[in-house]
Image (cartoon, rainbow, N blue to C red):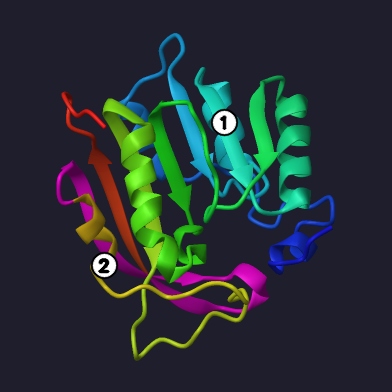
Amino acid sequence: MSIRTNYEKWYEGDEYYWGLEPGDFLLDLINLCPPAENTKVLDIGCGEGKDAVFMAEKGYDVTAFDLTENGIRKTIALAHKRGVKVNAYVDDINTFETDEKFDIIFSTGTVQYIFNENKEAFFKKLEKITKPNGIVFINVFVEKSFLELPPDWDKEEKMWKSGELFTYFSDWKFEKIDEVIFEDNSGGITHYHCMDTIICRAKPGKTI
């Protein structure tokens, strides 16, 4: 098993590191793109699968990948327990490829694993695989001089600059952009993050 990320170890046990409550942002995505027949979702960096499984329960056709083998194992187990199907597999945000196109793409807490030399290619890939009028949600941790690194900051994570994320979507319709500082207790130690978030919609008539 490749240990490129500490999460491989943190996901080993039966307990779910991030819990089982789906992300609040998913309600925004459902409102913007309600489930219908063959509405396809891609979860980039699905972790242990709580968000991917929730979207499958809502009726979406869900594909999800993560770098951690333990995360994918637990995603598949959670989907089986909940009686839904998720196409979950191990892959790397830096190198993943797909021939499918998606109505919703989301990635939370994962984009900071993109190597600098792969950023441009990653966002061009998102544009290519998002259906016309499709929705993309991404958040990323950003650097603030007055905030210390979180205690569970991973060895391959890289902080982004404030506002940097938004520059990659200048040709999309913004549904939401936001920057917030919030308290977190992951790892059992109270700490703070600054996070930039974007929800945007691809142009209806876009062609790649």
Residue appearing at x 72%, y 49% in the figure: 71
Q: Is residue 175 above or below residue 99?
A: below
Residue matched to label 2: 164
Q: Determine whether the residue tagged by mark 2 lies in a helix, strand or loop.
A: loop
Q: Which residues are magenta?
A: 170-194
Residue matched to label 1: 63
Q: Is residue 162 left or right of residue 40?
A: left
Crowdedness near tag 1: few (<14), some (14–19) or many (≥20) residues, C-alpha within 10 Å: many
Of 188 and 132, the residue lying toward us: 132
N-terminal of the two: label 1 or label 2?
Answer: 1
Q: Amino acid at mark 2?
A: Glu
Residue appearing at x 21%, y 48% in the figure: 176
Q: Is residue 53 left or right of residue 59?
A: right
Q: In this view, which residue lies farthest toward the bottom?
A: 146
Give the label on residue 207, or none. Answer: none
Residue appearing at x 63%, y 55% in the figure: 18
Is 111 contained in the magenta span?
no
Residue appearing at x 37%, y 42% in the figure: 126
Crowdedness near tag 2: few (<14), some (14–19) or many (≥20) residues, C-alpha within 10 Å: few
Q: Is residue 74 left or right of residue 23?
A: right
Q: Is residue 63 left or right of residue 135?
A: right
Residue 39 picture location, percent across and down: 43, 18
